[in-house]
Image (cartoon, coloured by chain):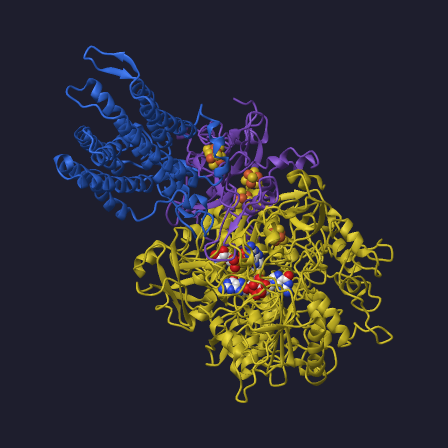
Chain colours: A yellow, B purple, C blue
């Protein structure tokens, strides 16, 4: 396999190494061809289950990332006396860097661990960064989830025990109808494209619901343009139609959901809205006891759920023997959607009622009449044998178009319910889980229950991020005030299961809930594209208190490139690229599992580190060892792990647990998997298997996993789960109702602060409902008639790729795409300079007319605009002169509607950043204005170790010729 | 006329415009026989570069009936390539054995005349080397015996995630490409110029669903079980009560 | 199309050179057939040939600047069977050689008679050589014109008119140059050259004016429909696929706004044709300076004409490169 490179130019010592791509979060297998040690060609690895040999635009441009002039190559310290943000640094050695960190962090840990905050962006190693933070003892840790798509995770996991995003997806191999909602690219970049191509060739029908028609939507058989932020209304109307016509899968609802379970509807009682439960004794654990009631249609009375040959009613209103008024959960859903008619939705979404009806009919009829029976016998949790696995071939996929709104949680709950009504959960042709999903609803991990969870010199007593099952799981003090810097798991955003990274800087700057000392950012460009209200946030980073100290005293940035955020650092830790380091895609984190079973993977270095770059993984191991964090010190008190590879092999979640970062080739000789003692030769074994471990489940374990006895017992045996109990779908969410009862003062235990009672009561509705995004209610939407959204370009990864000589030629700067009618109204033409104004800021950019956008919506490619001087680009580069960032227009905080306080611009349930709620107006820029973007920022100089590329030509030829 | 004509067939029905073919082409070729593919101002204003393949986007129709068409384009390896006869040096030539149109960098004097004679804008001059360049159909891969059979394909074809790029001999009626052209209405670009491009494009194909009203009300409607589709009560009036014969 | 200055100079310089040479030969031939014409000295023709040669050489020199790889220029003779460019590359040196021979013969012996005619005049060796050279020169005009005329993807260029105009403009500028030369040398052929230059300039004006009008009326050579093969009335390019630019957006893009280009037409017609014509008329019996000016003005005018010739050329490929986003 080395011949081709040689043949290609008849020279050079060539070799081919395999590893895992990280030009994006998809993590495809790649083959890296080297000539004389230089990267010559990167191709998809045909023997990798994820991408089966294909590669994307980013992955194929890895060479230009590896040899980018924007690479940080030396640890940097802010120059004495230099202003933060000016980007003036002196190069230092790693010893000094570690000494600085060790001294500072040790002090913080012994005094007040909360004063160290670690936030990581679009990284892939939350298991390790999280472990470090937990052992350090700070509660202030989160990754990108909060500003990314936590609504998608929470909304679906609290409903079906799994989700899209990296946790599950549509089974396009067997689907006949595929509905994609609010997705531009997503994490499964290559697999989605491969599946979509095959699906279309098989003649499957593809419907795209999106305000914009690009990328995937371009090849849809039908494009359904929708007004941003209104999908909840559409989904509820679809549910309405499907319920009205009886197009739902009744058997599925009865067997696998809480639809038939009786809910107490007695007005005013403490248990109003809770399921009625028999007092049969139940085992306690993080699973749902099966002690609910059904209303049996033949006996016409309440019977224990699943009682022998009982057949429940889904509809109707009944009274228990003791007179308690009860209704099946499904009845409550039916009542909820009664007024959510297609006509009602038409007014909100802009989609004709007839279209909404047709969509509902297509879904219902396809699910019902084109159903699949796979000849796979399986046994459910109740011991019933099934001859086959049934599938209703209607698949959905949705991402941030639903998630990134302040009403996203309920919209996504509605989607989960729609998928459930159609009977498509973990069934062929529908939605399929990826291990380690499904999880119990909610999953077991819980944050500490109060301030006492944080103790100097001790690890955090609880998980950093978890899944509250009721108000008592919140991470608040006695006054109900947040313990976390980002106010995660507080009454403001009770189910913020991924934290609220997007508020970390603002809160730290304001000292609300408390000031911190050291903020460490790993792989997060928080001074630019992953922050809201960018202009102000950049000021906060340099703001000082009365006695001249920075309000955020110490800022550490671990990055591989000269990003906008680097300029604000007091200490910069240069990371390696993905081609230079060991790395794992762990079952403890978000592995790359397939529908048919768990898959995890590794990265192995194919080229040596550049300059003094050090893998951040090594940095954490080193720091943990120096700080003597529990788990990182050997019996003799010395350091326990030589380095990261050694750590990966030998670390166990608990001594002897046999569970570690990698699931494959465990056990002394690599004979075990999932669980087993450390195997010294684990890395080799992964390397030999194209850097991944793939366990294909027996076919009878591959479907219906929420209720599949075989699977659940297998999962329990291999410690994926603690309990092999069925995971019933939460059509009706008792969890949410518990928060509502607390807010209504009808529940013992933790109580919300008065100011927040109405907020919690309003938004913790056990059934999905539609409300306009909060931001629209906080502003005069008449003055800002347009919705502004962004999309991921398929050839760029967030802010990373402007330093990539090839990719930036595709997107050197961005335009604001508008429907021609917007130009007509604003008096500007195609290509003109315009001002985009929101209540929170204004940006000058160029407009491009498009007929492929809903006329009330304007959009642009995400994170193309850059700050002058960053990313190894010349100060006059297009990115900073013509490119722009929509983030300047998006507020990170909103006036709190119900009581006038301040809240994050986020979903009130999950704290999901509401990026796509922003509304704008567009006006022509005056002719005498400069033809350049605004705001612009003073160029920052390249720091030591980052050399700006002087030459005019780059003629890359691995092995020398041409340069 | 050659009895073999290699070509790409691009399926616009599944092309999502991801540009994988653009950069994978660049990376394969820049360090290969056809390389380097130079970039100018790579990190400055208005970066420019030599690419053998570009993906463009067109909009067809007006809102809401808009089609967005992603349109990849590289040299079409015409069977009557106007770019070849005009070349004064013979640097531009069409291979008899497989119909690939190539440029011999060692003969090219960089007069650019051939590019004037290409109606498709498929040639890219490289000021760095001073020669004309273009898609080589990855001639330095597709015959490489050291590669496994299934990888002996152009870099862009191997890269394309949705499989929108097919490669093969359009003169062989049984080849994948010939079948695709036949069965899916493959067409050529600007046939009016008589260049007879070897590369073909497959048009958009639509899948629709037709629902008969009967399908919406059916025998086993679950609503019946819920008593939601009422049967009139026995006591309700009927003809039986009023008619005599 | 982007006007390449090397090519502007190449075509205008050799045009004038070729024209001048043809003027000399016709001047000489005019004596043979003409009624009471005077016979010019060998030195006069030799000098003229030298001047023509100088123009041709400068043109050739300019052409090298158009090649990215001039050292390989010689390779361009390879494809004379199919390539007009190749043919031009062969003919240009050939013509120069013949001009040289013509000039030299005039110096060494202007008098070897080949045939003597009834009117007592005779065809001598230099004139014979002149005829051969003239033939080659005319062919060269055809080649140069055909290089552009055969590009059917540029409607403004395609067709016989390009050849006709290149020839006429070359002749016009060449005869004007001859007139100026005659004035310098005080030659008796002055009147003959002025008169024919005037006529040729006016004919060239007609030819060029016609094509300018024709261009204005040309429809699009192809449509986006056939370009991407989608049969719909409303097709717009949203992006050409890259932002920065590429060879295809530079080589084929026309400088200046369409408006500017339109406004330049009359200027070019005035400078390249009308004004020289007037100056020629003025210089007929009048001051020599008028003739010098005539050539200077005409040459600059034709440079402008050539610039417009390129700038107005709209290549079919531009359908694919309209917009970035
Ligand atoms: N307006 C708007 N804003 C958005 C979004 C949007 O859609 N619209 N999307 C949001 C979402 S979903 C997300 S996830 C965030 C993403 O935003 P971020 O989390 O900030 O992620 P990136 O910008 O991709 O990269 C952050 C940093 O990682 C660095 N980096 C790249 N590779 C490496 C490496 O190997 N090691 C190290 N140490 N650093 C590396 C890059 O140089 C960059 O500085 O943006 C959010 N912001
Ligand atoms: N190439 C590339 N791939 C990436 C990334 C990248 O930066 N580049 N980022 C990665 C990350 S971190 C993430 S989180 C994922 C995100 O994956 P996506 O969710 O696909 O990312 P977005 O670009 O936010 O896509 C949002 C889509 O929703 C649409 N939309 C916006 N508002 C609404 C609405 O109200 N309703 C509907 N129906 N649609 C709406 C937008 O038009 C857009 O098409 O992508 C990942 N993959
Ligand atoms: S999808 Fe992501 S991981 Fe896969 S090749 Fe592209 S950049 Fe690499
Ligand atoms: S790689 Fe395939 S899908 Fe992507 S742009 Fe190229 S042809 Fe289209
Ligand atoms: S596409 Fe252009 S370059 Fe390619 S063969 Fe046809 S004419 Fe020649
Ligand atoms: S540029 Fe090269 S290939 Fe093109 S015509 Fe001139 S010599 Fe031939
Ligand atoms: S065939 Fe090869 S050279 Fe041609 S476009 Fe594809 S990758 Fe590029
Ligand atoms: Mo994200």
* Figure disc tally: 0
Q: Residue furthest top?
A: C118
**Residue A934 visible, this orientation:** yes
Quadrant of residue A259 in the image? bottom right
Pick whichever, A265 or A303, lies toward us: A265
On the image, the x and y values in percent for residue C98 come to 36, 25
The quadrant of the image that shows the N terminus of chain C is: top left
On the image, the x and y values in percent for residue A224 come to 45, 51
A476 left or right of C187?
right
Ligand 4 is found in the corner quadrant, namely: top right
A585 left or right of B42?
right
Pick whichever, A93 or B108, lies toward us: B108
Pick whichever, C277 or A91, lies toward us: C277
Residue under the point 47% across and 54% down: A210
Residue under the point 57% across and 65% down: A562
- Taking B131 as reference, is A472 above or below it? below
On the image, the x and y values in percent for residue A937 come to 46, 70
A848 left or right of A741?
left
Quadrant of residue C12 in the image? top left
Q: Residue furthest left?
A: C285
- Taking A196 as reference, is A631 above or below it? below
On the image, the x and y values in percent for residue B209 come to 49, 42
**Residue A137 visible, this orientation:** no
């Amino acid at each position: 396999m080395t011949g081709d490179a040689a043949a290609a130019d008849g020279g050079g010592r060539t070799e081919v190494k395999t590893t895992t791509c990280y030009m994006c979060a998809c993590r495809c297998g790649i083959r890296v061809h080297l000539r004389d040690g230089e990267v010559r060609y990167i191709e998809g690895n045909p023997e990798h289950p994820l991408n089966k040999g294909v590669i994307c635009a980013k992955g194929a441009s890895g060479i230009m990332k590896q040899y980018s002039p924007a690479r940080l190559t030396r640890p940097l310290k802010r120059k004495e006396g230099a202003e933060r943000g000016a980007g003036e640094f002196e190069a230092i050695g790693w010893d000094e860097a570690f000494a600085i960190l060790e001294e500072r962090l040790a002090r913080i840990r012994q005094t007040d661990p909360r004063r160290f905050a670690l936030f990581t962006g679009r990284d892939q190693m939350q298991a390790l960064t999280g472990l470090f933070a937990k052992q350090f003892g700070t509660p202030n840790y989160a990754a990108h989830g909060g500003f990314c798509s936590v609504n998608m995770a929470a909304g679906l996991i609290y409903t079906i025990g799994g989700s899209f995003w990296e946790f599950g997806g549509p089974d396009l191999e067997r689907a006949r109808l595929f509905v994609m909602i609010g997705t531009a690219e997503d994490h499964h970049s290559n697999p989605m494209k491969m599946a979509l191509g095959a699906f279309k060739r098989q003649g499957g029908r593809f419907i795209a619901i999106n305000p914009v028609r690009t990328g995937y939507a371009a090849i849809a058989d039908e494009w359904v343009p929708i007004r941003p932020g209104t999908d909840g209304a559409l989904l509820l109307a679809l549910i309405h139609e499907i319920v009205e016509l009886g197009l739902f899968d009744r058997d599925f609802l009865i067997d696998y959901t809480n639809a038939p379970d009786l809910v107490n509807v007695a007005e005013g009682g403490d248990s109003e809205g809770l399921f009625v439960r028999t007092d049969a004794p139940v085992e306690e654990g993080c699973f749902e006891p099966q002690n609910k009631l059904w209303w049996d249609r033949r006996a016409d009375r309440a019977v224990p759920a699943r009682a022998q040959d009982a057949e429940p009613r889904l509809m109707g209103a009944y009274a228990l023997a003791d007179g308690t008024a009860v209704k099946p959960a499904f009845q409550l859903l039916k009542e909820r959607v009664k007024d959510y008619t297609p006509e009602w939705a038409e007014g909100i979404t802009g989609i004709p009622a007839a279209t909404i009806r047709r969509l509902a009919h297509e879904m219902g009829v396809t699910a019902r009449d084109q159903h699949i029976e796979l000849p796979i016998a399986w046994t459910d949790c109740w011991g019933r044998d099934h001859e086959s696995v049934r599938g209703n071939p209607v698949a959905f996929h949705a991402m941030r178009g639903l998630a990134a709104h302040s009403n996203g949680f309920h919209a996504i709950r509605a989607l989960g319910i729609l998928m459930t009504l159609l009977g498509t959960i973990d069934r062929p042709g529908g939605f399929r889980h990826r291990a380690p999903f499904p999880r119990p609803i909610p999953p077991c991990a819980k944050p500490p229950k109060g301030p006492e969870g944080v103790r100097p010199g001790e690890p955090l007593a609880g998980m950093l991020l978890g899944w509250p099952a009721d108000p008592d799981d919140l991470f608040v003090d006695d006054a109900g005030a947040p313990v976390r810097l980002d106010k995660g798991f507080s009454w403001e955003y009770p189910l913020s299961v991924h934290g609220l990274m997007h508020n970390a800087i603002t809160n730290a700057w304001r000292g609300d809930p408390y000031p911190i000392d050291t903020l460490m950012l790993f792989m997060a460009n928080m001074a630019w594209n992953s922050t809201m209200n960018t202009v102000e946030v950049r000021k906060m980073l340099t703001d000082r208190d009365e006695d001249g100290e920075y309000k955020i005293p110490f800022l550490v940035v671990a990055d591989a490139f000269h990003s906008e955020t680097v300029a604000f650092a007091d200490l910069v830790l240069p990371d390696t690229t993905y081609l230079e380091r060991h790395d794992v895609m762990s079952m403890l984190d978000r592995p790359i599992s397939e529908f048919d079973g768990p898959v995890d993977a590794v990265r192995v270095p194919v080229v040596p580190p550049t300059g003094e770059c050090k893998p951040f993984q090594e940095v954490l191991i080193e720091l943990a060892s120096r700080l003597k964090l529990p788990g990182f010190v050997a019996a003799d008190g010395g350091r326990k792990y030589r380095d990261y590879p050694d750590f990966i092999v030998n670390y166990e979640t608990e001594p002897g647990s046999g569970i570690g970062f990698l699931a494959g080739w465990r056990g002394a000789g690599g004979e075990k998997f999932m669980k087993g003692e450390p195997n010294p030769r684990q890395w080799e074994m992964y390397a030999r298997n194209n850097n991944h471990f793939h366990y294909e489940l027996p076919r009878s374990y591959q479907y219906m996993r929420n209720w599949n006895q075989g699977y659940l017992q297998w999962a329990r045996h291999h410690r994926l789960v603690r309990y092999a109990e069925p995971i019933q779908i939460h059509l009706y969410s008792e969890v949410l109702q518990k928060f509502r009862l607390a807010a209504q003062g009808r529940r013992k235990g933790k109580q919300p602060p008065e100011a927040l009672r109405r907020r919690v009561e309003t938004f913790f509705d056990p059934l999905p409902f539609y409300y306009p995004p909060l931001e629209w209610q906080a502003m005069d939407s008449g003055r800002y008639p347009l919705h502004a959204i962004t999309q991921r370009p398929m050839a760029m990864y967030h802010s990373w790729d402007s330093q990539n000589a090839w990719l930036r030629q595709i997107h050197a700067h961005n335009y604001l795409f508008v429907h021609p009618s917007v130009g007509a109204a604003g008096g500007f033409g195609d290509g003109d300079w315009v001002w985009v104004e929101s209540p929170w800021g204004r940006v000058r950019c160029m407009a491009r007319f498009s007929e492929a956008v809903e006329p009330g919506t304007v959009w642009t490619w995400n994170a193309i605009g850059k700050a002058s001087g960053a990313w190894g680009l010349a100060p006059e580069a297009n990115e900073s002169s013509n490119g722009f960032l929509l983030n300047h227009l998006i507020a990170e905080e909103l006036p709190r509607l119900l009581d006038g306080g301040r809240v994050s611009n986020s979903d009130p349930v999950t704290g999901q950043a509401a990026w796509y709620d922003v509304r704008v107006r567009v006006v022509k820029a005056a002719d005498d204005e400069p033809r350049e973007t605004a705001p612009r920022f003073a160029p920052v100089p390249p720091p030591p170790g980052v050399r700006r590329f002087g030459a005019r030509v780059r003629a890359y030829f691995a092995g020398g010729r041409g340069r | 006329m050659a009895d073999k004509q290699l070509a790409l067939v691009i399926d616009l029905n599944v092309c999502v415009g991801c540009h994988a073919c653009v950069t994978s082409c660049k990376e394969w070729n820049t360090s290969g026989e056809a390389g380097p593919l130079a970039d100018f101002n790579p990190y400055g204003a208005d970066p420019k570069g030599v690419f053998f393949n570009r993906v463009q986007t067109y909009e067809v129709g007006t809102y809401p009936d808009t089609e967005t068409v992603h349109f990849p384009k590289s040299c079409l390896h015409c069977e009557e390539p106007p770019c070849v006869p005009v070349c004064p040096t013979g640097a531009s030539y069409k291979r008899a054995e497989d119909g690939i149109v190539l440029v011999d960098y060692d003969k090219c004097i960089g007069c650019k005349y051939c590019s004037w004679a290409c109606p498709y804008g498929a040639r890219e001059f490289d000021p760095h080397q001073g020669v004309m360049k273009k898609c080589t159909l990855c001639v330095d891969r597709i015959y490489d015996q050291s590669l496994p059979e299934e990888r002996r394909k152009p870099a862009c074809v191997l890269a394309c995630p949705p499989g929108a790029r097919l490669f093969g001999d359009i003169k062989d009626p049984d080849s994948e490409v010939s079948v695709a052209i036949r069965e899916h209405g493959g067409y050529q670009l600007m046939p009016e110029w008589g260049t007879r491009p070897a590369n073909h494009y497959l048009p958009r194909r639509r899948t629709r669903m037709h629902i008969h009203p009967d399908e919406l009300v059916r025998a086993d409607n679950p609503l019946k079980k819920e008593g939601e589709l009422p049967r009139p009560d026995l006591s309700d009036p009927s003809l039986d009560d009023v008619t005599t014969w | 199309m982007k006007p390449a200055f090397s090519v502007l100079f190449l075509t205008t310089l050799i045009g004038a050179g070729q024209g001048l040479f043809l003027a000399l030969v016709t001047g000489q031939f005019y004596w043979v057939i003409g009624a009471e014409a005077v016979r010019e000295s060998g030195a006069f023709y030799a000098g003229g040939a030298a001047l023509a040669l100088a123009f041709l050489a400068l043109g050739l020199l300019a052409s090298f600047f158009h090649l990215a790889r001039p050292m390989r220029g010689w390779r361009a003779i390879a494809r004379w069977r199919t390539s007009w460019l190749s043919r031009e590359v062969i003919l240009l040196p050939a013509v120069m050689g013949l001009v040289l021979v013509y000039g030299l013969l005039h110096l060494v012996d202007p008098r070897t008679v080949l045939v003597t005619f009834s009117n007592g005049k005779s065809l001598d060796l230099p004139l014979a050589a002149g005829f051969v050279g003239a033939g080659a020169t005319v062919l060269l005009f055809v080649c140069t014109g055909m290089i552009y005329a055969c590009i059917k993807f540029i409607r403004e260029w395609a067709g016989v008119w390009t050849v006709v105009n290149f020839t006429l403009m070359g002749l016009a500028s060449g005869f004007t140059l001859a007139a100026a030369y005659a004035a310098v040398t005080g030659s008796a052929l002055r009147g003959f050259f002025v008169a024919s230059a005037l006529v040729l300039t006016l004919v060239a004006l007609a030819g060029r004016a016609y094509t300018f009008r024709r261009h204005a009326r040309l429809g699009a050579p192809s449509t986006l429909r056939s370009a991407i093969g989608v049969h719909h009335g409303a097709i717009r390019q949203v992006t050409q696929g890259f932002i920065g630019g590429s060879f295809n957006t530079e080589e084929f893009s026309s400088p200046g706004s369409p408006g500017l280009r339109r406004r330049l037409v009359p200027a070019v017609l005035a400078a390249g044709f009308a004004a020289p014509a007037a100056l020629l008329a003025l210089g007929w019996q009048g001051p020599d300076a008028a003739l010098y000016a005539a050539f200077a003005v005409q040459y600059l005018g034709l440079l402008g004409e050539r610039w417009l010739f390129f700038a107005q050329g709209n290549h079919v490929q531009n359908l694919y490169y309209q917009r970035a986003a």
